[in-house]
Image (cartoon, grey):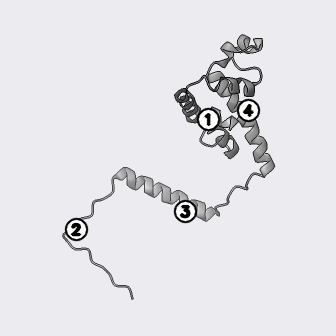
Amino acid sequence: MMSSAKVPSSVKMKPLPKSLAKKLNDDLTVSLAMLKAGLKRKPKLPPVDYARRFANEKILQQRRYCDAFALWRACANKACRRHRRCSGDQHACLKRAIVTVPRTEQWRVRETILAATPRNIGAPEREARKLMPVDFYV
């Protein structure tokens, strides 16, 4: 048998703020609806597909860094200077210039890219976007 514990009359409980109470209620409603509907996990991505998507996003991320650091200005490739963006081998260009770009600038650009990343992006793309420029060569 359970004993009922009485709260002393000297202890006063504060009510929750309305905004917090509404959020908790909404969260509970969503959770219960998911359970009722039979919460199903998304199937995991096969390793080959994960690696392919990660490699593709890694190439795009290197190009984003090249463009953000304006490496096209000093590039020997005429197409890069003409288009004012990386149009050649972004891997070689970023590797060559990584020592000249200050670490604080690299961090700032990475944070800007992460802030612009959609919340619903896939796992391989998210992991590639989290990489700092120096991480591509370690």
Indicate which disc, 2 or 1, sits on the residue closer to the N terminus. 2
Observer-side mark, 2 or 1, equals 1
Name the quadrant containing residue 52: top right
**Nearest to the observer: residue 68 or residue 133:** 133
Q: Count how many numbered circles sit on residues in the image.
A: 4
Residue 97 versus residue 29 in the image, above or below: above
- How busy is the neighbourhood of tag 1: few (under 14 within 10 Å), some, or many (20 plus)? some
Indicate which disc, 2 or 4, sits on the residue closer to the N terminus. 2
Q: Position of residue 2 (x, y in %)?
A: 38, 85
Mark 3 and mark 1 in contact (Cβ < 8 Å)? no
Name the quadrant containing residue 118: top right
Which residue corresponds to mark 1?
132
- Mark sitting on residue 32: 3
> For the residue marked with disc 4, what is the amino acid?
Ile
Observer-side mark, 4 or 3, equals 4
Residue drawn at point x = 74 percent, y = 25 percent: 92
Which residue corresponds to mark 4?
59
Which residue corresponds to mark 2?
11
> For the residue marked with disc 3, what is the amino acid?
Leu
Indicate which disc, 1 or 3, sits on the residue closer to the N terminus. 3
